[in-house]
């Protein structure tokens, strides 16, 4: 019997013993190569071996080298059995034959498609199945001073309109800036923030056939919104550093940031302490903070969340049954340990099982985060905020994913043309129509 013959929904506890006939060793490439994270993965591999008799060799690979190493190993017929990889490789590797998409699809079916965050699955959808198995992810967050919003009678910043209303009510520099927008053109941070803002209004430069000209009306709405939040920001070249510093000092009402800020907000990291009061270990700022993962523009009332998803890929050279067994174990019996590798940046893409739909989300909320001090996220933030953090993965999007054009979209983003032209518009060097035309000209030339 192999895992492929099992019916979806069979309890993993009943599945695993069927593989214990002959012990095998598989190789697992992981980009989580920091010593503490590596140790956690090796402990998970040891527990898997104790449960199944099959061993896992955990091999660290630097993320920037992953693409070239995988291509070389594929050419040599020497791929590892399982690769932990970023979204950008899922579809290209599937198309190249590096991944066994049937194996990934079978694991997802067995664990229960309905137990996965829809957005995470949709990003890896491939020929009626899935390129890889979603493991974890994080959603970019609009971080805001919930206490000030409540005092001013403001709605949470879930839309362009609500953000601008809050800017109007709260912007009072230099004591309080309404926003700290990313304006440093050569920083990837600006690219990431802008993609989220464009997605919120349903604007993308790619479609099923490649480049898709930006709609002038909807893109103008994006530009006008971004100029408004930039004008509510301090002057200068702004990126993640100023965003965090000004929010931490109590001088910013809203910023856009990754969830890696969550432990810092609570005073758990000495290298980035909140300075809103005299105690750098105080959780006061965390208690005054709200977050939004999905927000909308006027042309896209459903809005969008920007997410970074990671996957387990079973390779074409794998010992397929054992590789699938390891992935299934890591996403079920061992899933809490998988998330515990770095819980502040590993949101569960499986909230639970069919029998207990919130099992993993509940366990994740109780995992310790922090560096110099530790505390569970569930002790630092209320249940509604935890639900918002995890829920963003249900509707997560990225340019090009749905259209099979992620690689092209990535080249467009990396060109920084959008950053540069948006900055020209913000600075009053060109008007909106000229900015849209310039973006269409430059992005349309990228292949």
Image (cartoon, rainbow, N blue to C red):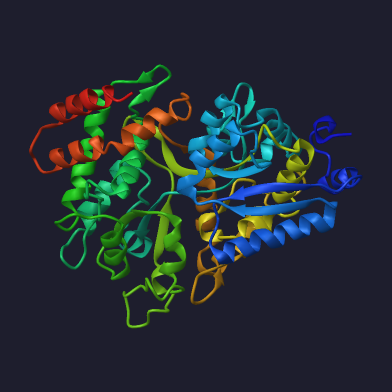
Percent x, y of residue 2: 85, 34
Vertical relation: 264 (above or below) 210: below
Quarter of the figure with the C terminus: top left
Residue displayed at 44% across by 59% down: 260
Quadrant hosting residue 406: top left
Percent x, y of residue 110: 76, 36
Residue displayed at 46% across by 24% down: 403
Pick the front one: 391 or 322: 322
Percent x, y of residue 31: 54, 51
Quarter of the figure with the N terminus: top right
Pick the front one: 100 or 70: 70
Residue furthest top as drawn: 209
Residue displayed at 32% across by 47% down: 188
Residue displayed at 35% across by 49% down: 157
Pick the front one: 42 or 292: 42
Vertical relation: 304 (above or below) 447: below
């Amino acid at each position: 019997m192999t895992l492929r013959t099992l019916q979806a929904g069979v309890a993993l506890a009943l599945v695993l013993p069927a593989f214990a006939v002959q012990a095998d060793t598989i190789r697992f490439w992981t980009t989580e190569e920091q010593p503490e994270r590596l140790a956690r993965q090796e402990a998970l591999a040891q527990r898997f071996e104790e449960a199944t008799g099959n061993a896992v060799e955990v091999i660290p690979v630097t993320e920037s080298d992953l693409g070239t190493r995988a291509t070389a190993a594929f050419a040599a017929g020497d791929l590892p059995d399982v690769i932990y990889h970023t979204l950008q490789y899922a579809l290209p590797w599937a198309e190249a034959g590096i991944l066994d998409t049937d194996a990934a699809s079978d694991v997802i079916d067995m664990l229960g498609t309905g137990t996965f965050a829809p957005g995470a699955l949709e990003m890896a959808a491939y020929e009626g199945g899935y390129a890889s198995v979603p493991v974890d992810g994080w959603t970019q967050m609009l971080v805001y001073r919930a206490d000030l919003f409540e005092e001013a009678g403001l709605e949470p910043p879930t839309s362009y309109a609500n953000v601008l209303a809050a800017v109007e009510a709260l912007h009072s520099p230099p004591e309080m800036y309404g926003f700290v927008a990313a304006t440093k053109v050569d920083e990837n941070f600006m690219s990431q923030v802008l993609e989220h803002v464009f997605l919120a209004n349903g604007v993308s430069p790619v479609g099923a056939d490649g480049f898709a000209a930006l709609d002038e009306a909807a893109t103008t709405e994006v530009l006008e919104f971004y100029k408004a939040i930039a004008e509510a920001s301090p002057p200068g070249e702004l990126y993640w550093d100023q965003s965090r510093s000004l929010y931490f000092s109590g001088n910013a009402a809203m910023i856009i940031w990754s969830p890696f800020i969550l432990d810092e907000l609570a005073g758990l990291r000495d290298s980035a302490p909140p300075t809103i009061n005299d105690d750098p270990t105080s959780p006061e700022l965390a208690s005054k903070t709200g977050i939004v993962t999905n927000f909308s523009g006027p042309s896209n009332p459903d809005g969008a969340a920007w997410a970074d998803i990671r996957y387990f890929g079973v390779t074409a050279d794998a010992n397929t049954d054992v590789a699938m067994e390891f992935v299934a174990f890591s996403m079920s019996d061992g899933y809490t340990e998988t998330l515990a590798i770095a819980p502040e940046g590993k949101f569960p893409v499986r909230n639970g099982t069919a029998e207990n739909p919130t099992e993993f989300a509940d366990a994740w909320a109780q995992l310790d985060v922090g560096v110099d001090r530790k505390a569970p996220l569930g002790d630092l933030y209320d249940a509604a905020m935890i639900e918002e953090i995890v829920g963003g993965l249900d509707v997560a999007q990225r340019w090009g994913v749905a259209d099979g054009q992620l690689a092209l979209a990535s080249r467009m983003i990396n060109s920084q043309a959008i950053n540069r032209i948006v900055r020209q518009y913000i600075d009053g060097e060109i008007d909106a129509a000229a900015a849209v035309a310039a973006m269409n000209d430059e992005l349309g030339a990228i292949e």
